[in-house]
Image (cartoon, grey):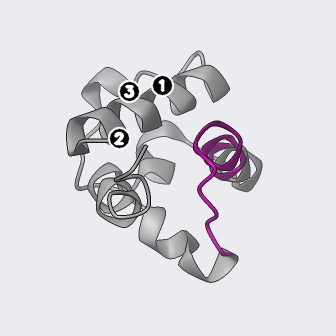
Amino acid sequence: MTRDEIKDAIIEIINNILPEGDCSKVDPEKKLRDQLELDSMDFLDIVMELRKQYKVQVPEADYPQLATLNSCVNYLEPRMADI
């Protein structure tokens, strides 16, 4: 997957989990939790959807690397390159 495809996939997952959230105005450099008011369960749902849809395992120790949209893409790019 390309960086743009990964970004779109993340946004789609977030939109499905938070239908009232608006990802169109997300600043890719700011924390997603702050911008979208994600709680810990919402964040875990995002991680679980990544595993379910794309077979990407994200260890709990790596969760801080998923703080912003850009950091998510940076983290996932090598793990989703062959998808």
Which element type, helix, strand or loop, lies under badge 3?
helix
Tell me which numbered mark, 1 or 2, is placed earlier along the sequence.
2
Instruction: Report if the CB atoms under discs 2 and 3 are less than 8 Å apart.
Output: no
Using the image as rendered, state which of residue 14 and residue 32 is in the foreground: 14
Judging by the rendered image, the residue that carries numbered circle 3 is 23
Tell me which numbered mark, 2 or 3, is placed earlier along the sequence.
2
The disc labelled 1 sits on which kind of residue?
Answer: Glu
Q: Which residues are magenta?
A: 46-59
Measured as percent of width and height from the top left, residue 61 is found at 62, 83
Judging by the rendered image, the residue that carries numbered circle 2 is 6
- The overriding secondary structure of the stretch rendered in magenta is helix
Which element type, helix, strand or loop, lies under badge 2?
helix
Which part of the image, by quadrant, shows the N terminus? top left
Measured as percent of width and height from the top left, residue 20 is found at 57, 16
Using the image as rendered, state which of residue 39 and residue 12 is in the foreground: 12
Judging by the rendered image, the residue that carries numbered circle 1 is 12
Using the image as rendered, state which of residue 42 and residue 9 is in the foreground: 9
Horizontally, is 58 left or right of 22 in the view?
Answer: right
Disc 2 versus disc 3: nearer the observer: 2
Measured as percent of width and height from the top left, residue 83 is found at 43, 43
Q: Is residue 39 above or below residue 24?
A: below
